[in-house]
Image (spheres, coloured by chain):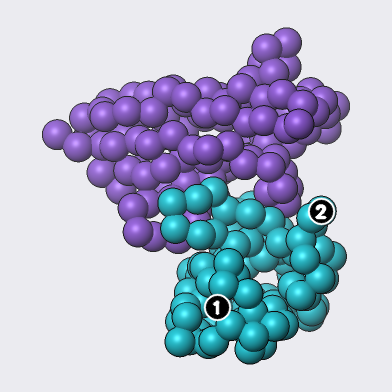
Chain colours: A purple, B cyan
């Protein structure tokens, strides 16, 4: 059974940093492209970024609102995906999901990030 | 950036009726269009990918069609559990991958 389990969310002040993790199991993580998708309270889905598998170059792409502030990385030895979020703003508040890519067949349960003073 | 416009914003129908949801792309995305269902408090679920292929375990009453810029999700014979928010998503021209703003399907 495929499982994606996010962790690391919480309350952070504007300008602060947070690192989210996503532990994967039930599939060959090292071969998978992975994405982060977020959802602000009461709003729609927003793509945050993607990381390819190392065999496909391991490159990353980001949505414009987070480019330069967020970094996606992966540790295939730990089957874990990361999202490092710096210079956080109030508009970054929301639930963050890790998903398989490019079509998001598998989703984690999400982790809530709240940016507030 | 490809903009996806979903219509209508809200669709009110009764169980047993047929729902037709639209997603229009600002440029051609070929057939790289997916549909997701999200119920309140739940994680989104992939229904359709590549415009018309049902994901594993998705009932046959869900069907997708279209290519280029105009896409449709049809739900025939609505069941009570189908009332939810539906999003389209494109990966035909990326980055960025983009989502539509959603269509809320509510019980009439």
Circle 2 is placed at which residue position? B56
Side (left or right) of A87 relative to B37: left
Residue at 64%, 85% in the rendered image: B16
Answer whether residue B95 is visible to the viewer in this image. yes
Residue at 44%, 51% in the rendered image: B41
Name above or below for residue B35 compared with residue B75: above
Between disc 2 and disc 1, the foreground one is 2
Circle 1 is placed at which residue position? B6
Tell me the CA gap for discs 2 and 1. 24 Å
Q: Earlier in the sequence, mark 2 or mark 1?
A: 1
Residue at 55%, 78% in the rendered image: B6
Residue B93's image quarter? bottom right
- Disc 2, disc 1: CB below 8 Å? no
Residue A78: x percent and y percent? 68, 12
Secondary structure beneath disc 1?
A: strand
Circle 1 Cα neighbour tier, 10 Å, few/some/many (<14 / 14–19 / ≥20): many
Residue B21: x percent and y percent? 62, 82
Side (left or right) of B83 relative to A95: right
Name above or below for residue B97 compared with residue A7: below
Q: Quadrant of the N terminus of chain A?
A: top right
Residue B13: x percent and y percent? 53, 87
Circle 2 Cα neighbour tier, 10 Å, few/some/many (<14 / 14–19 / ≥20): few
Residue at 61%, 22% in the rendered image: A23
Foreground of the two, B15 or A33: B15
């Amino acid at each position: 059974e495929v499982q994606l389990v996010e962790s690391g969310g919480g309350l952070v002040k504007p300008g602060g940093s947070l690192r989210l993790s996503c532990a994967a199991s039930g599939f060959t993580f090292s071969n998978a492209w992975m994405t982060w998708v977020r959802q602000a309270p009461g709003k729609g889905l927003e793509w945050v970024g993607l990381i390819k598998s190392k065999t496909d170059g391991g490159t990353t792409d980001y949505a414009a609102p987070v480019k330069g502030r967020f970094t996606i990385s992966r540790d295939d030895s730990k089957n874990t995906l990361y999202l490092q979020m710096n210079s956080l703003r109030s508009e970054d508040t929301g639930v963050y999901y890790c998903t398989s890519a490019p079509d998001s067949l598998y989703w984690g349960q999400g982790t809530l990030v709240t940016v507030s003073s | 950036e490809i903009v996806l416009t979903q219509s209508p914003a809200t669709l009110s129908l009764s169980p047993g009726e047929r729902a037709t949801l639209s997603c229009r792309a600002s440029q051609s995305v070929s057939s790289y269009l997916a549909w997701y269902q999200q119920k309140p408090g739940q994680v989104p679920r992939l229904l359709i990918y590549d415009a018309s292929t049902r994901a594993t375990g998705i009932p046959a009453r869900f069907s997708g069609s279209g290519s280029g810029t105009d896409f449709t999700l049809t739900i025939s014979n609505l069941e009570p559990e189908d009332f939810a928010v539906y999003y389209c998503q494109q990966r035909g021209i990326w980055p960025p991958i983009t989502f539509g703003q959603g269509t809320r399907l509510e019980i009439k």
